[in-house]
């Protein structure tokens, strides 16, 4: 059974630009130059890449990248891709193969990192995590809202969009912290200076995100004042690394009964059974694969949903999550069998 998803747009690469070490920007437009679907600050698009190998059944890859041009621009999408030496190959493929003039499938923008109403905004970027915060800075500046943008990079040579940051009308709101030239950003002091009406937005590598979260916890900030976007899942804690073992999986719409082994991904088991499922990050950070729990107790391992989405909306990310119960029944979001009522 296929889950509904709009087919990807076919866009053309109208510009490719090396921004700094290992980071390339791609500008994407419709071939006829028409308007693209609108997006908000913080949104990302999925690029559809070929499968990693030619093996039968190999699944094409999707990779998410934040849009970093001003959201008012309707004619283009701008993304920046950092080549990850230890990644899963998507960024390396883009660096090696995607050139100006090439076409590529792109899913419409989705936003899991939206700006929220607040008098003051503190934007905290670690390296390439700058990209969604650039779009936020554009929107906040245009709206006359107060914000600060702090960017931590290993060296000035690794600062993406250096010229744009320098020339933007909001460049006075930007502070760059380069490890090899500046004193390290004192996150504790920075957060302590903020009023209770400030919201922080944080995007960057796992270590940077953890440092911000620690500083916010130490400063007594409530969790809802720190909005985060992960682009890689942190390593699981040692306790979670122990797989709970085998469980039975029911696909509620058809009654198919499947088996999930200790090291299997639920998403891969569903795909192997012919159940179409959009997957992208396969790390529980994009929400693309989201299903709903019909019955059973889920072991949620994603970073994208909170308690309400897990416990009330019964959302489940099969790319990374598992089951605490011996049997788990799943269905597409919004699916309802005759006479079935969602718990909660
Ligand atoms: S594929 Fe990204 S959360 Fe599952």
Image (cartoon, rainbow, N blue to C red):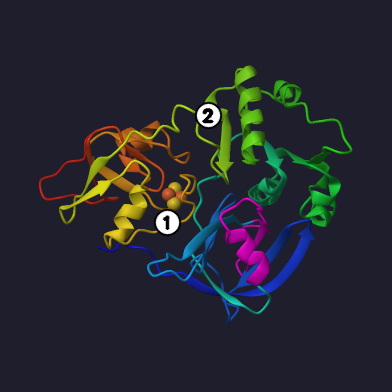
Q: Residue furthest right?
A: 181
Q: Quick check: 75 left or right of 339?
A: right
In this picture, which residue range is highlighted in magenta?
68-97
Q: Can see residue 69?
A: no
Given contact means CB atoms under 8 Å apart, are the residues at marks 1 and 2 in contact?
no
Q: Residue 188 in magenta?
A: no
Percent position of residue 161, x then y: 77, 55
Q: Nearer the viewer, residue 287 or 37?
A: 287
**Mark 2 secondary-structure assignment:** helix
Mark 1 CB within 8 Å of ligand 1: yes
Residue 279 numbered mark, or none: 1
Q: Nearer the viewer, mark 1 or mark 2?
A: 1
Q: Quick check: 6 left or right of 196?
A: left
| Residue shown at 72% from the left, 62% from the top | 24
Q: Nearer the viewer, residue 61 or 286?
A: 61
Percent position of residue 74, x then y: 60, 67
Residue 224 numbered mark, or none: 2
| Residue shown at 35% from the left, 58% from the top | 277
Q: Quick check: 62 left or right of 290?
A: right
Q: Nearer the viewer, residue 52 or 277?
A: 52
């Amino acid at each position: 059974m296929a889950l509904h998803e709009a087919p990807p747009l076919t866009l053309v690469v109208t510009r490719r630009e090396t921004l700094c070490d290992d980071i390339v920007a791609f500008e994407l437009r419709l071939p006829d130059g028409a308007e693209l679907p609108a997006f908000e600050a913080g949104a990302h698009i999925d690029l559809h890449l070929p499968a990693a190998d030619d093996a039968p059944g190999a699944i094409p890859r999707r990779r998410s990248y934040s849009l970093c041009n001003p959201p008012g621009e309707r004619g283009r999408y701008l993304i920046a891709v950092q080549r990850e030496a230890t990644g899963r190959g998507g960024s390396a493929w883009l660096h090696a193969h995607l050139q100006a003039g090439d076409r590529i499938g792109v899913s419409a923008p989705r936003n899991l990192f939206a700006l929220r109403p607040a008098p003051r905004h503190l934007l905290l970027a670690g390296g390439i995590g700058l990209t969604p915060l650039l779009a936020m800075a554009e929107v906040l500046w245009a709206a006359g809202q107060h914000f600060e943008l702090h960017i931590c990079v290993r060296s000035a040579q690794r600062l993406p969009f250096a010229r744009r940051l320098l020339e933007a009308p909001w460049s006075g709101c930007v502070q760059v912290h380069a490890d090899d030239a500046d004193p390290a950003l004192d996150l504790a002091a920075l957060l302590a200076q903020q009023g209770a009406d400030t919201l922080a937005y944080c995007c960057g590598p796992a270590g940077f995100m953890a440092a911000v979260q620690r500083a916010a916890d130490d400063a007594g900030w409530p969790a809802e004042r720190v909005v985060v976007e992960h682009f890689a899942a942190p390593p699981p804690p040692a306790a979670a690394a122990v797989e709970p073992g085998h469980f039975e999986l029911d696909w509620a719409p058809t009654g198919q009964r499947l088996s999930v082994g200790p090291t299997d991904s639920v998403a891969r088991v569903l795909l192997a059974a012919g159940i179409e499922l959009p997957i992208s990050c396969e790390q529980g950070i994009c929400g693309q694969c989201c299903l709903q729990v019909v019955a059973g107790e889920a072991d949620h391992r994603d970073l994208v949903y909170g308690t309400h989405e897990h416990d009330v909306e019964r959302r489940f990310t099969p790319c990374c999550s598992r089951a605490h119960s011996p049997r788990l029944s799943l269905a597409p979001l919004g699916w309802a069998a005759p006479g079935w009522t969602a718990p909660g």
